[in-house]
Image (cartoon, rainbow, N blue to C red):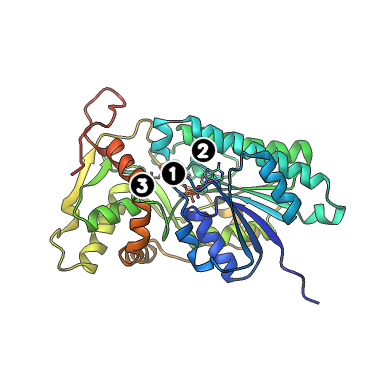
Amino acid sequence: MREESPTWLVTGGAGFIGSNFVLGQRAAKTARIINLDKLTYAGNLRSLEPIKDDPDHVFVHGDIGESPLVAEIFRRHRPQAVVNFAAESHVDRSIYGPQVFIQTNVVGTLTLLEESRRYFEGLSADERDKFRFLHVSTDEVYGSLEPEAPPFSETSPYAPNSPYAASKAASDHLVRAYHRTYGLPTLITNCSNNYGPLQFPEKLIPLMILNGAQGKPLPIYGDGKNIRDWLFVNDHCEALALVLKQGRVGETYNIGGAAELANLEVVTAICGILDELRPDSPFLPHASLITFVKDRPGHDRRYGLDTAKIARELGWRPRESFMSGLAATVRWYLAHQEWVESVQTGEYQQWIKKHYGPEAPKHTGTERTSCIR
Ligand code: NAD
Ligand code: DAU
């Protein structure tokens, strides 16, 4: 007899990675999904349109920090797993206003853990064996690497540098504590920079694609030599599904793309793809739009991840190469004007003005190059 498909509570499933995960899992019919999302500026129901009539995707509009709501979801839907994507995720926003990062990423995660623990303790021994709490976290908890240093491994010490990274580090520690103290079967993943369809255009890659296509300046912080490791979002989602099914309880897994690149290299590559896809553009060559602007305060110089553990234990490796994934991403943004317009709302315009406009705060006392048109 075939086993009935499980129910998972996914939080933040209307955001970038969460929506890609939910769409992928529903396409594969691996689980019935209860999708709890607050629909902040970063959450968008349009991203979930392909499954709007799917009876096995239940969207719940709400906050992970709302205890009674989370308890009610557990009572009503009895999930076998929780996958926690919900977070404030943009480093620059955390510099302007850290409070909401602490509220959602720390207090919200604590509430979700507490309700998960209550629910877990009421399960039968067999149900407890199967239950998992997967917390989706970031490589930024490890801090910044020196140019020649080996990449971060799962045993690297935590040294977060931005309010965002500090809030994610705090949530990782809480997840770990809930495993050690209460026996909650947790898993933590720390992933590098994701890119791909459905990413909110405040982040480097979609911002540069859309600005480039519209002939707007491409604002590069500092000298453009800060290095990030890039992973195509579907590869991250596959890794998460694997960790959920086969990861060892209580463990942490690093997930990365083995694609360390300087920001300037990434933006130049986007410009090259735009030149090819839009040979008649009035903005050729798109690289002429590159503008160096004042650096991000506390800007981490380099991230890189050693992913030997997930490769060895779970057989995971990224499938997508950076250049093919990037070209697919550029094509996706150019072909999905409706989605783009739906997220470039008043809130987005305000953010762009506040952060890149002439009125942007001069974080460290020196002049910021304004690059808004
Ligand atoms: P995102 O900002 O695109 O989406 C976050 C989602 O969470 C949104 O849908 C938002 O509405 C929702 N949300 C925010 N606060 C909430 C709350 N209090 N209750 C319920 N829902 C809430 O983020 P993302 O880039 O998809 O990142 C998802 C997760 O992955 C985050 O935890 C982030 O820290 C982590 N992560 C992201 C990356 C990356 O490169 N984007 C890399 C590694 C890890
Ligand atoms: O490393 C994983 C992290 O990657 C995730 O945990 C975060 O949620 C996610 O936002 C991302 O953080 P970054 O700060 O690395 O991503 P962002 O896209 O904001 O910036 C990438 C790099 O590009 C970074 O070095 C800053 C730089 N940058 C960014 C923007 C928005 C610019 O030079 N100009 C810009 O306008």
Residue 259: percent from left, percent from top? 41, 55
Q: Is residue 54 above or below residue 162?
A: below
In this rendered view, identify the residue nearer to me: 199 or 74: 74
The CA distance from mark 2 to mark 3 is 23 Å
**Any atom of ligand 2 within 8 Å of the CB at mark 1?**
yes
Instruction: Give the distance between the C-alpha atoms of the residues marked 3 and 1, in whole angstroms.
Output: 20 Å
- CB atoms at circles 3 and 1 under 8 Å apart? no
Q: Is residue 50 above or below residue 8?
A: below
Q: Quadrant of the C terminus?
A: top left
Q: Is mark 3 within 8 Å of ligand 2?
A: yes
Where residue 264 appears, as percent x and y from the top left, is: 28, 48
Q: Quadrant of ligand 2?
A: top left
Q: In the drawing, what numbered circle is on residue 142?
A: 2
Look at mark 3 in the image and give the residue it sits on. Answer: 202
* Label 2 with label 1: CB-CB less than 8 Å: yes
Q: Amino acid at mark 3?
A: Glu
Residue 160 in view, yes or no = no
